[in-house]
Amino acid sequence: SLQMERGSTASTPSFFVARNVRAMSPGRVKESWKKRNIKSDKSNGVPRPPTHSQQRDVVPQITPSFSTDVEDVQRVMPSLARTTMSFDIDDAPNRVNENSGVGSGSFDSFKDREGAFDRTCEDKDDDLQSAQDSEGYYINTSAFNLFECRQFLIAMGGNASNASLATNYIRTADALCDETKYVRAIQTYYAGLGVILARVRDWIYALKSDEEQRTANGVPPTHVAQEDFVRVACDPDMNIIMLIVSSILHRAGNAHLHLCQYSEACRDYNSAQTYRSMRNKSHDLTLNDEDDMLQGRISNNLACALSKCGLLDEARSEYTRALQVKQGILEMWHKRSKQSATSIEEDGDMPLVSDITSTFHNIGLLRVKCNELKKAEKAYKQSLSLRVKKFGLDDVGVSTTLCALGGLYYQQGQYDDAFRAFKESLRIWQKHVGKKNDLVTAEHYYNIGLIFYQKGPVSKARASLVECLRLRKQLCGDNLLPVASALTLSGMINTMAGAHEEAASQLLEALEIRQQADRNEGHDLMTIQLSLGNVYQLQNKFDDAMDCYSAILAEWMGRFGSDHAKVAQVLQSIGSAYLAADKYDKAKTTLEEVLRIRRLLEPQSVEMAETLDSLGRVLYKLGDTEKAGELGEEALEVLKSAAKDNSEPILLSKVMKNLGDYYQDVEAFEDAIDAYEECQRVLVAWHGEDHASLVEVLNEIGVTRFKSEEFGVAKYSFEEALRVMRLPQNGAQDTVIFPTLNHLGHALYKNNDLGLAAETYIESFNIQVSIITGDANDGLKEFGSKLSTIKDRISSIEQGSDQLKSLSGSLGSIANILRYIGLVIQDQGDFEAALSANKLSLSVRLCQPIRDHSAVALMAETIAISEYKRGNHSNALDYFSQALEAKKAVQGDTIDVARTVNNLANIHYSMGNLDDAMRLYSQSLDIKRICLGQESDEVVNTLNNIAHVMINAGREQDALEAYHEVLKIRQSCHGKSHLSVASTLSNMGDVYIKLGKIDIATTYFEQCIRIQKMHQGSCDERVLENLGSIYGKLGEWNKAETTFKEIIHLKRMSQGDDCSENAKILDLLAVSFIEQDRYSDAIEHLQEALRIRKFNLHEEDDEILASLNKLAFVYKSLQMTEKMLEVKAEFDDIQRRRRN
């Protein structure tokens, strides 16, 4: 039989999006945020983890790093590179027109600043990769134009010193924001705000009457009241101050947002909007436009902060307001342009269009957070459409939104679309940065690697992560958390690719970085440790794997309790480890507990399918194939429901492979082939047609085709498996190659390609010998000389050691392949070489330190039968005796032992050792009766053999007793008209002839013939000959004549007209005519007998002389003198030649 090693493969993670959070009104933002933080502190610590499908058969959960946001809502997404909280930021502001002292009236604001992206890559969220924002919103910033226009100088009372002081504060704060020093920036913004408020205070004081000033003792008030701002807002020269204050608060809100101080950001944004809305519109269209644009920006950023606070409905309203304001401004500009018959400058509306696209982008992010993915896609595409139309396909903002769209496609499992989006985003980004190495490029490679980790091929995933790691290690400096994130994903990818050493090294490095980081990220540590345990499991380092799992299990059970998804996750890994270590009972118990938890928590999930598949595999190993098949089919149904669009290809391939095994085991070969071919299709799509993971399923397809007797198709599958194994990138070892060579040899042998089969078996043999000896081997003869060296090596190895067990197993495999070689060579007709191969196989078996007695017995019997057929009865006797000794060493008195004893008796019988034969037949008979009962066919066969011995020993009466017992059993078991009954009747007739009781013999022969004709239309020629002869002795020549004619007809039908045996029967037929005085009828048959003898024998043979003599006698009896003399002359001539 062909036994296959069934291994394991790798798997992919699945990702979850944040849950919606109840909307709240703006007035409750701060209070609710405090409550949220309190609630988060009282939670279980880490939210429910992401889940994914298990590694093939032995590797459990692999989970990429993720973070928990401030809403205590888990969110696992790809690193979104430039989707991460990028900004609409102004270019250099317009300067005051030095000639006229009046602002130019055009505002080059709101263009995307390429430097707005997070270059430091602080690891706020390892999968989102952004320090500035973990969800990728654009934040609109205020223009600087207001601080440099003439109206501001007028509002500051013409005091250039105070105006310059305020301006410098704001410039300094903006610069601090560029350096990500947001705390100092906020302080500086508030200092600038203080200068502005001082000017308002002085202006209000100046408006007071002399009496009011005297009442205040000539000291301006320390505070500015609300009614003071109302007065400022109504004054045409001062109301620009309202925009200035709003702009400063807007900037401070942005800094708070960067610091994740969302309630403070909401406070400043609401204040900014309040101050701005208090201002009376002036006749200055430029200021009014700036007012409207500031309103749109504040609404945009307030929506972002509200979203961070979980107030999604309020955020949606603010985004809608921002979009309405911005689009209204753009429409108004175009309307003015038409009314004044002047056109907007070519790039005059570009900042505003950029603002609108940024809001569409942010709306898309909010839709994602609300799980409105189709609406999110629409918003992203609206943003892209506007950007491409206005700025061209290569605009850096297009790269940003493409990244966000790629992330959306990734969440939906649209990996091809996601790859195209990220690839185009990377192209645009690299066009802007050139050949410069930067972290944004690294993040793109991370994303692309993550996509290929999901969709395959895994080789591209590995290549992307190699580049990501190179850049991050080069650029991240002291902040190694992004490196740890990439190392973790790279470790998982290498695990899937089978590069286990590299995977373990990377995961250990990631674990060390995480442990050294001054952060409370215990979950990330556990995730890496779990992945590391999976790699150890694949490396068969079960103790190390269990150490990892045990630590994680204790941590998570203490934190979450027993009925938690994370506990099920680690138990799944433990169950898989037990399965890989062949501890099936423990695996069953563990996986049944996992199944209980997952049926309770996630009955229609990918994880549920994974557990069903693993438990099915355990039951299959325990021999319950039927139940295993039921679980496997349930796993497939759950997986199809849970993983849409084949988003879990590795788990799907594993489930289909296992189902194929179950179907094959119950001989449902067509179903098995369908399952295996689906597994093959998935693996090819995932890894490509040259990946090592295909070898196992190709071998299984070959085995199933072989069992279905489709030997040609099986041969192709094994050849394809060998081709894949021998590819340089797969680096398959000889220990993996030779079993497939064995399978191929079997298929070639069955396909009657004996030459190729022999070559394949010998190649496998040479490989196996080289593995043991460490030297190349060339054929059977060379190996024979190495056996003594192997024996010496065995004697030097400690008894009971693993090394000795391994060597013994390898020798057994060599002995087995030698047996196959002997079989093929024998069928090629070289019996001497076949016998030599078999004897060498037996020598190897006897060399095994752990003796396989059954295999020794098999080879000894094979050799014994070959020697018997060659007539070497003495050698046959020795080998049968050796086989019997081997069987008795492990079996006792079994039916197999009885058969070998029977064969030994046969050899003694052939050698004439009747006493020994009788003794052994009797032993065999006793064992068979005990094992099989009295009425077994094997018992009857041995009784039959005993009767034969008795006949040859002259014990006819004893022989008849034995035959009577045989007859009774056969008639009882098969009925009185069975062919075996006819055979026994014939044997009994022979005995009665020897006893001279020919009348009784006649009765038995006639019964035998009747039964034989009933079944096959003809009968045994030997029985007919005996019966014809008896009829002659009884004088019943008519019956004798009929019988002899029937014999001649049968012989001519089976052997042709010229068969030498026909001559003898023709003589007997002629005698029957002579005895009836029908001499003329005898002549014809005597002449035909003479012709046949002349055809077959030498012309001077005695039988020819006898035939001539009989013919002369008949001629003489008929007085045919002339004919008689001719015959006599021929007779005399032969006699004369013989004398000469």
Image: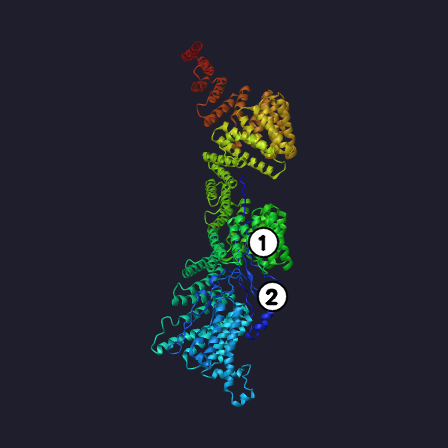
Visible in this render: residue 1097? yes
- How dense is the environment of label 1, judged by Cα within 10 Å: few (below 14), some, or many (20 and up)? many
466 shown above or below 407: above
Query: Which amino acid, mark 1?
Result: Gln
Query: Which amino acid, mark 2?
Result: Ser
1007 shown above or below 300: above
Nearer-the-camera pick, 825 or 550? 550
The numbered mark at residue 529 is 1
Image side of residue 423 versus residue 893, left or right = left
Which of marks 2 and 1 precedes in the sequence? Answer: 2
Visible in this render: residue 316? no
The residue labelled by disc 2 is 40
Residue located 58% across and 38% down the image: 806
Image side of residue 464 versus residue 1002, left or right = left
Q: Position of residue 958 (x, y in %)?
A: 64, 24
677 shown above or below 156: above
